[in-house]
Amino acid sequence: MARQGRSRRQFLTQSLALAAVPAVGVSALASLVGCRQSRTGDWVDEARAEIPAASRYGYFQTAGIAPSPTPVLDVVAERLHYQNLGPAAGDIFGEMSPIEPNLRAHLASIFGAHPEEVALTHSTSEGINIASWSLNWTDGDEVIITNQEHPSNVIPWYNLRDRFGVQIRAVDFSAGADVVAGIQSELSGRTRMVSIPHVSRNNGRALTLQESGRIVKLLRPGGIRYHLDGAQGPGCVDFDFHALGCDAYSTCGHKWLLGPKGTGAFLVRREMLDETLMSWTGAHSHASMDYDGSYELLPAAARYEFGTRALADFAGFDAALSWMENLGFDRVVSRVQELAGYAAESARRFGYGLASPVGEGASGVVVLTLPDGTDATKVYNQLAEREGILGSPVRSPRDFRLAVHFFNTHDEIDAAFGAIERYLTQ
Ligand SMILES: Cc1ncc(COP(=O)(O)O)c(C=O)c1O
């Protein structure tokens, strides 16, 4: 995971450099960024001051959709305006062009991958679809998922089941369940892929590096593909693509990385590139082509990208990575762990159950199991409408999710529990 590499000054300089274009004007930009000069004080307070949603709400919905910091939004707005001064003009086109390679390289450096292993996408779901369509499935082939999936790692498999007769097996990913043994017992001569969450949106369980390593050992000898749904991974738990060992990893910018909505990445191991077959393609996937039937794909994961794309959003994704890096991913993740532990302890004090693990396998996704007869969707509505506290119901009717990011505070967690308790005892 990235370290606290770059100083705030470097980041601001970089933001200014990114923003230093005729569309806005240097003095306007200086005042835009200047008001965010570092104040003395706690790093969390300083960061919160740049995330308007953090003081507007008790914002516990990072696992759904996260707020972006203002400097990130400014980069998106500025790049969008700049591009539209003349999208086809050589100078403007030329300045926009490095956005994608820069972002791939940045993601690679943060995620422990090589730049040619990174494709830019618009969502985690897009990556999951690249992975799920990367094999020539035949009737009776099997995929292993878990019982704690987001719909985006279920519906693609229903679709492949209905189109090609793919059989879906689900293993137990509840807190404490032995997922490695579960996978081992579901393996058969027809298993072709395992696609499971890095962190479940449903119960917050994070696959540990050790578990992931054991899964690799089970799958690799038989050439069974291993894909992780990492929507809730980077920024929420420690993350290193090669240390996890999976063949492919799908993630997004719009959750724990606080990037623009509609940004994501799909990572694939270099050695697996040619075996990770492509189902959708178009201009920009190719290194060369002619109109007589020949084409050659890019020798990199960028081959999974095609068509005209939202460069301003990708510039914002890059700025979000810098913003997070400036805080320090280690510092972010350890605060997430500390706050999640505090939330778990609060659940115990209030006598609620916990669907999420405590200690090993814990993440920032904390899922309370409320008392018998509670409808978590009603709790969600009540808290959102009356208290401005944004959590989320999940799959099980009594389960209520508080996604705890570094910008949340102990006071907010206390307020959330107080509000839940008030609502339950009303
Ligand atoms: C585990 C998981 N997978 C996939 C998704 C879908 O993410 P996206 O909206 O980036 O496609 C989510 C969104 O909440 C998720 O939590």
Image (tube, rainbow, N blue to C red):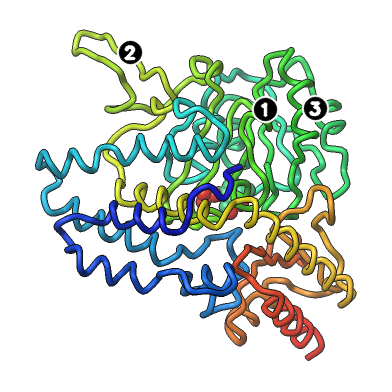
SS state under label 1: loop
Residue at the image position 86 percent from the left and 77 percent from the top: 350
Occupied quadrant, residue 332: bottom right
| Disc 3 + disc 2, Cβ < 8 Å | no
Label disc, if present, on residue 296 of the rendered structure: 2
Residue 9 position (above or below residue 379): above
Can residue 76 be seen in this snapshot? yes
Neighbourhood count class around disc 1 (C-alpha, 10 Å): few under 14, some 14–19, many 20 upward: many
Q: Quadrant of the N terminus?
A: top right
Task: Identify the residue position indicated by label 3 in the image.
Answer: 214
Residue at the image position 12 percent from the left and 41 percent from the top: 91
Task: Identify the residue position indicated by label 1 in the image.
Answer: 245
- For label 1, being within 8 Å of ligand 1 is answered no
**Horizontal side, residue 261 vs residue 46: left or right:** left
Residue at the image position 85 percent from the left and 73 percent from the top: 371
Occupied quadrant, residue 259: bottom left
Label disc, if present, on residue 125 of the rendered structure: none
SS state under label 3: helix
Residue 36 position (above or below residue 212): below
**What's the residue type where badge 3 is placed?**
Arg
Can residue 151 be seen in this snapshot? no
Neighbourhood count class around disc 2 (C-alpha, 10 Å): few under 14, some 14–19, many 20 upward: few
- For label 2, being within 8 Å of ligand 1 is answered no
